[in-house]
Structures are given as structure tokens and as C-alpha cells.
Image (cartoon, rainbow, N blue to C red):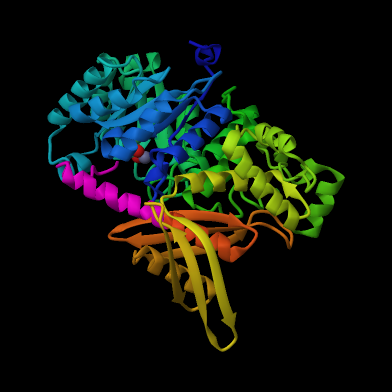
Amino acid sequence: MSSDEQDPNHVRIFDTTLRDGEQSPGISLNTAEKLEIAHQLARLGVDVIEAGFPIASHGDFEAVEAIARADFYPHPPVIAGLARAQAPDVEAAARAVRDAERPRIHTFISTSDIHIVHQFRSTREDILAQARAAVAHAKSYVDDVEFSPMDATRADLQYTAEVCAAAIEEGATTINIPDTVGYTTPEEYMAYLAGLYRLIPELKDVVVSTHCHDDLGLAVANSYAGALAGARQIECAINGIGERAGNASLEEIVMLLKTRGDISEGLHTTVVTKELARTSRLVSRLTGYVVQPNKAIVGRNAFAHESGIHQDGVIKERTTYEIMDATTVGLDANSLVLGKHSGRAALKQTLAELGFVVEGAALNTAFKRFKEIADKKKQVTAMDLEALVTDDLRNELASYTFDSFMVAAASGREPHAEVTVTLPDGETAAATGTGDGPIDSVFAAINAATGIDAQLRAFRVDAVTGGQDALGESSVVLQYEGQSASGQGVATDIIEAAGSAYVRALSNVVRKVQAAALAVDIGAGEPVPTP
Ligand code: KIV
Ligand code: ZN
């Protein structure tokens, strides 16, 4: 046990970006992308990474196993796998996390009558027995077992207490109280936890956890109230992603505890706050979920001052209008780092400082792209480099690649595009297309070249940094055979960025269609419903 875990005021940060966050519509991270995020979460210093829901699909299992096997030296976080309170789920989670230095099984079942009657079509007695059996089963594999009574905040307090007491009796070491549908309020959640402490004397011997959804915009406030009521683990996700309106945002809860330490009874986390902005950008890039400009802590405008009075105040004394310093969350990373005369060693060193270990062929690719960009852009910033390295990672993973394009567009004439794409078997395919605009015609040509009739559901282009010579970053969401997936691309030319994003979204959506077909082929039946 580390000294942090013995510290009674240490609030553990349980990150569920890769599990609850990944359940957001349109997000489809593959194993390498999840690993990249897991490494960044470890650098950020989270205490627990919920890596996925191993029984949900082969892809989920593989990703949890890969994260459990990864080397997170020197501070390996706990790696948790989610399991319904059923034997096959618990066994899959146990297999997936078994190689982790610090494995955890997180099992859950609902205690609200609304779920017991309508979803489980069961009885309180049966649910209690299932919870007990699942925790005991999980405990036969790992010491560290978390139990969640799902929809607890809409459930009878007495009954939830009875189920949690049984879970503790069977060896649960963490009891998580989910506000599954984002229904509770800070006062109510505090009173609910106080009620549980009153009804279950053993609750003080385990870690109590919060898991709050944001349907009423109260997820962070409720999590904070939970910590004041005694919880010492907060479940949250980067950028607040997750089911529906999402989970409590990790960066907000961490900065709330840091900034208002004066009234938080000494509660603190061990998160390295300087890594927050970068983690937010990585998750946004890989998931395709844009961070709203006015998002607290990590939004583009979170530290921008528009009104003259505010600007005047901040110039004279920063604290007149800023309660946090942008540098504490890592938002100062956009200073110039490299120029066009910088060499390979400087690039490698700068990437290492940014937390990327890039060597061998990957370094050659990164260097080639850096030179291309440096020729076009006067300044190559840390944010540009991050965008490039993440972009190269996507290319390595895509089964289709966007090789080249030619577009003819003029006023009064229908745009026309020619593209070449490398197919999964290594063959090159060329095709032409027309559309409403140059980018639309490139998308039509890609569909023709790959023979995949995907439908465009969302499309965006943003600038990575400011300035006229900024890199363009594009995100595309596609629908195909009942599945949807996103892809992202970065380039100085926005048509190239959009084409890359489209082809990567195509790779992701085809992978999802194939995984869904495989689940049926192997007799797994319907995909496992996610919580
Ligand atoms: O929202 C929820 O209740 C969950 C549980 C699995 C903890 O995600
Ligand atoms: Zn949830």
C-alpha cells in the first residue's frame, strides 16, 4: 500500500474514459488507441484505469488485456475490468486483467425497483443473491473487487444498504454508488451516502466511490458532495465523455479540489495537473469528440479574456479575473518548439519531452512529416507535433489508407475528384467522384474506390493552432450497415486532412461491421448490452 492510499484525505481518481467514455455514440477506439490513452492516463497520475468491459466484444477483451499487460513503470495504476453480476462476465474480466500489476474486477447490478422489475424482470431477493455470488466469484480471482449497485440514487436506501453490506461481507473493497441516470442533486447525494454510512457500519472499512452522470449538469457537483460525505474515489472521464450527457469531467473535479482546497477539508488528488490539457486533446483527437470552446479547464476559451475591463485587470494582476493559472493545467504548451532547421535528434528529444517515445521507422516517418510541415509553417509548436504523432499512429492502424487526390473545382461547374486508396490487401484502387463541393467529391471518389457505400453523418474541419498557416484537423463520422464510427486526419491541406479522416472512419466502421458479424458467427448472440 502506498502512502497516498493510507492518507485519509487522498481522493482516488478512477478514470472511466476507456469504458463509460467509450460508450458514447460514434466512439470506436481500437486497441492501440486505447493503449495510447492508457499511457497518457498513467502519466496524468490517475489511480485507477477502467480499461473496458471484457465480455462485451473480442475487441474490448483484447484492449483490456493489452492495457493490463502494458508497462506503466514507475507508477502502475490499478487496471479494472467491468463485469455484470454474472459468472461469464466475471470470468472474462478476470482473464482480461490477470496480467496487470494491480488488477481489479468491477462488478455491478441494479438495486432500483425500476430496473429490477422492468429490466431484470427479477426480485430484490434474486438481485441480492446475484450480487453476493458475483462478488464472491470475483474475489476468488483478485483481492481488489469493486461493487456497484446500479441506479442506486433512484433505489430504496435500506435495500441498497443490504446489498452493499452483502458485497462487503463477500470481500468487496470498494463500494461505488452510481447516479446512473444523472438524477440526484448534491444535497440528496450527500444524504444518501450519509444514510449508507449509518446503515452499514462496515462501510467505513472500504473505499466509497462516486459515479455521477451529467444529465442535469450536476455530475461534478454531485461527485464533490460525495467526497465531502466520505467518498474517497471519484469515477470520472476526460472531457466528461460517457453515456448520454456523459460522466463527471475528470479535469473539473481535479481542479475543483485543487483550487478550492481551502474549503474541501484537506481532500486532494495526486493527479499531475500539467498533463490535463494534453490528455484532453489526445482523447478529443482519438475519439473525434470536440471539446466545446467554453468547456471549463480545457476549453480553448477557458483562459481567454475578451472584454477590455477583464484584459486590463489581467495585465495588471492575473488573479483579478483568473482563479487558476493556465500553466497549472498545461495550457502553455503552444510556445514555439522547433523550426525548419531542427534535426532528427531535436525532434526526438522534443517528442520525448512531450511524453512520446518515437523511435526507428516511426521516428523517420515523424521526421519526414515534420519537415513537410516546417517547410510550410513558420513555427512548429508542441500542439502541432502532438497532432502529427497522433495522426501517424492512426495511419499505422487503418486498414485503408488515403494515398493521393486531385480535385477540379470552379464556379458554375460540378467539382470532380480523382483519388487513390490502398486497400486492406495492399492493392491500390483509383476512382473518380463528383459532389456538392471539392471535399464531397473526394468522399464520393473514396466510396467508389473502396466499393463501400458509407453514409456521411458528420464532418468538421478545425485549425490545430491559430494563424493563417495552421494545420487543419478534420473529423468524419460515417454510418455503414448499422454501425457508426469516426476518423480524424491532420494536414496543412484541409482536403487532404478530410480525405484521411474519411478513409480512417471507413477503416473503423468496417472493423465494427466485421466485429458485429463475428459476434453472431461464433454464436455469441446479440451484442452484450452496455450499462
Ligand atoms: O452508470 C453506471 O451506473 C455505470 C455502472 C456500470 C457503474 O456505468
Ligand atoms: Zn456510468
User: Where residue 190 appears, x then y in whole percent?
Assistant: 43, 32
Residue 390, magenta (yes or no): no
Q: Position of residue 55 (x, y in %)?
A: 26, 35
Residue 163 in the figure: left or right of residue 425: left
Spot occupied by residue 309 in the image (x, y as percentages of width and height):
81, 56
Q: Residue at x 84, y 43 (%)?
A: 317
Give x and y (percent) for residue 251.
56, 38
In the image, 338 versus 79, the foreground residue is 338
Residue occupying the far front of the picture: 427
Tag count in the figure?
Answer: 0
Q: Residue at x 57, y 80 (%)?
A: 409
* Image quadrant containing the C terminus: top left
**Which residues, given as a range, are shown in magenta?**
506-531
Q: Is residue 253 in sight in this rendering?
A: yes
| Quarter-of-image position of residue 52 | top left
Closest to the observer: 411 or 149?
Answer: 411
Left or right, 505 with respect to 10, comes to left
Q: State which image quarter holds ligand 1.
A: top left
Q: Residue at x 77, y 51 (%)?
A: 379
Q: Is residue 507 magenta?
A: yes
Q: Is residue 111 placed above or below 371 in the rendered structure? A: above
Q: Residue at x 76, y 43 (%)?
A: 338
Residue 53 shows in this picture: no
Q: Quadrant of residue 127?
A: top left
Secondary structure mostly seen in the magenta stretch: helix
Outermost residue to the bottom? 412
